[in-house]
Amino acid sequence: MAMHGKWWWVGAVLTVGTGAFAEPPPTNSAQGTRLHGSERFEFINIPMKSAEPPPAPANHQCSRAAAWMEGGRLGVNQNCTVDPYPMPVRRMLTGETLVNVAFRAPFEGRSVKLTIREVRCHADITPPTYPCTAENIQVGKARWEYRVTAAPEDKQEVALCPTGSGFALAVPNAWSTSGDLLQNPNYFTFACAPSDQGSAGKPFFVGGGVISKCIDWGYAPWAGDSATTDTAAREYHQLCTRMAVADYCGEGKSNTLDGTPLSFMGPQAAAAISLQGKLPEQLGTTGHSLEAVWTMDACGLARPVCLGKRRWDTLSTEGTCLDASLHIPETKVTCEMLNLSQLGDRMLVSYSPFLDRALVTFKRGANEYVTTTAVQGFPGESAGGTELGGFSLMPGMGDTVPSTFDPLRVEGPILAATLTTELKQRMETFIKPLYRCATSSGRNLLTDSKVCDSAPGYTLKSIAGDGGLEGWVYSAVDTTSTGQRRPLKLWRHATQAGVFATSTEMPSGYTFVRDLGYLPAVGQLPGRDL
């Protein structure tokens, strides 16, 4: 959960370019890994002309229907004649009267039928929430949300939003598979909303996608007043969605973990906390470090103009960057070096704690393994685990010189041992600890047992006073999710007593002991948003 609610600039009105944007309310800010939050149906763009309303009354003769959107308002119009009257009338469905209206959209080379089954008033994740009166809907203070089913090829219906609240907002325009917002009034999309499973004063938002979040944070992709242009609104919405999934390269790929706390601000607030145009590395005492500065580039695309130093230091966990200006260490510019006065007025600045650490397996000889986050990496040289030469084992691991171990595999990211008490309390039903154990002779064991599986000779091995806590993995995943599951497993050597390995793949000569938990695979596991 973001902590930037303590700062004076929260809730201030920021005037940017030709429009006015509210500094996002702080209470429920957290990154996610999905744009729409609809998993299998993530990038469905719905043609306006595909609307199929329920049958009209028997005495109505109606033409083909078409949907329309005005801001966040979805409606369906149909021209009808009513016997015996010669003058045509317009049948207009909006709000709760959209129940049972269906749409058809291209999907996997065929089509999918999307049907609205329920309509209710949307509760913003950032209060206040307004009732869906005609006046509030008209001025944009309130909006409807929709429970939608999806039926590929008109076969069995499934929920469009399998996680979160189960409801979605209607959002104008279309999206590319690389996460670009495409201005096209002939299409709209459904964006799944998260659900609050927390307690009073401690919200815990689960599921959904960042498009819905950004709308609730104050960055809707449409103009909210006469002082704002639709172009400016779309650009800020695009900046927000890229920031919320940490899509550093504009590839449509996330570089964060679901639920990573997020603090963010616009140009005025960023300038207010800067010293001579330079952003601070840390945001107060909240543990948030400078992550990125997001702007529109010369091609009109939302991109980070720089990454913070700590983001560079951890990007090797699951970084996807292919862009040379971000990927090559010699050419990188960290955000701490940037002068804000050199940027334009379309900008977001993000701060976040870094919960992820690379879990790397090293090997020595035929069957000796060490799996640990106690690694040294070279930022940008081991992105995504494709260049293992970027990692080396830190001193203190193993019984001899660490360089005798060779990196074998980046298993994936795990949550750092330094997870704050508040985050541990919020995530306690989803995570479990991993402990680092060793013998006096230098054998290593990474397990979920604080007593080191009662293996003879093994005791907890502390590094820098961490008590032997390596980090945290997910204790379970949603079994209905279509996302990849990456279980971390404990293995025992088939013939050598007291020799263990921990990895996602079976080492040669080892036998399976048990699953230890699940790695929070970036962009794959169901959204668990704090």
Image (tube, rainbow, N blue to C red):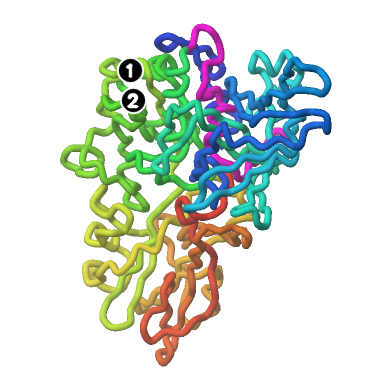
Residue 73 appears in the figure: yes
Element under disc 2 = strand
Residue 283 appears in the figure: no
Q: Nearer the viewer, residue 140 or 98?
A: 98
Up the image or down, 48 lies above or below 277; here it is below
Q: Nearer the viewer, residue 294 or 94?
A: 94
Q: Amino acid at mark 2?
A: Met
Q: Amino acid at mark 1?
A: Leu
- Give the percent coordinates (x, y) of residue 200: 74, 35
Residue holding disc 2: 296
**Which part of the image, by quadrant, shows the N terminus?**
top right
Q: Are marks 2 and 1 in contact (CB under 8 Å)?
A: no
Asked whether, in this view, residue 270 is left or right of residue 323, the answer is right
User: In which quarter of the view is residue 510 placed?
Assistant: bottom left
Up the image or down, 448 lies above or below 184; here it is below
The outermost residue toward the left is 330
The residue sitting at 67% across, 37% down in the picture is 52
**Which part of the image, by quadrant, shows the C terminus?**
top right
Q: Earlier in the sequence, mark 2 or mark 1?
A: 1
Find out whether residue 454 is within the magenta segment: no
Neighbours of disc 1 within 10 Å: few (<14), some (14-19), many (20+): few
- Give the percent coordinates (x, y) of residue 238: 43, 29
Q: Main secondary structure of the magenta part?
A: loop
Asked whether, in this view, residue 523 is left or right of residue 480, the answer is left
Element under disc 1 = loop
Residues rendered magenta in the picture = 200-228
Instruction: Please count the marks in the image.
Output: 2
Neighbours of disc 2 within 10 Å: few (<14), some (14-19), many (20+): many
Disc number at residue 275?
1
- Give the percent coordinates (x, y) of residue 188: 54, 32
